[in-house]
Image: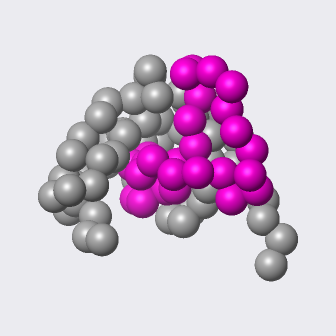
């Protein structure tokens, strides 16, 4: 999967939709799980590949190729899963 070659703004994160790696299920539509696909240079809390929970209503949906993304800012990410190796 190739990631769009776009420059992200300060603290922006590009996310693909995904499921919780720990099996957590959201019980409402105000949170979703996703995988960080790209981060801005100023993003210091997340790295590419992190599994996160975010508010999709505060993001901007994008489609690149056949992949759906959501462009969000760090403050709209509510948690990051920590999966033991």
Residue at the image point whose x is 44% and y is 21% from the top = 57
Residue 42: x %, y % from top left: 47, 51
Residue 58: x %, y % from top left: 44, 22
In the image, is 82 to the left or to the right of 71? right
Report the span colored magenta: 13-39
Residue at the image point whose x is 55% and y is 21% from the top = 29
In the image, is 23 to the left or to the right of 47? right
For the residue pair 42 and 14, the one nearer the viewer reads as: 14
Residue 20: x %, y % from top left: 66, 51
Number of disc labels:
0
Where does the N terminus fall, quadrant-wise?
A: bottom left
Taking the image as drawn, is residue 10 in sight? no
In the image, is 17 to the left or to the right of 50? left
Q: Is residue 69 above or below residue 4?
A: above
Q: Is residue 61 above or below residue 20?
A: above
Residue at the image point whose x is 33% and y is 46% from the top = 69
Taking the image as drawn, is residue 15 in sight? yes
Where does the C terminus fall, quadrant-wise?
A: bottom right
Residue at the image point whose x is 43% and y is 36% from the top = 72
For the residue pair 39 and 10, the one nearer the viewer reads as: 39
Task: Spot the residue most to the right.
Answer: 84
* Magenta stretch contains residue 54: no
Quarter residue 83 falls in: bottom right
């Amino acid at each position: 999967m190739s990631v769009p070659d776009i420059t992200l703004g300060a603290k922006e994160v590009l996310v693909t939709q995904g499921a919780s790696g720990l099996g957590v299920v959201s019980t409402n539509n105000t949170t979703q799980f996703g995988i960080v696909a790209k981060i801005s240079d100023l993003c210091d809390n997340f790295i590419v590949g992190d599994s996160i929970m975010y508010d999709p209503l505060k993001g901007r949906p994008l489609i690149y190729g056949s992949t759906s993304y959501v462009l969000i800012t760090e403050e709209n990410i509510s948690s990051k899963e920590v999966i033991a190796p």
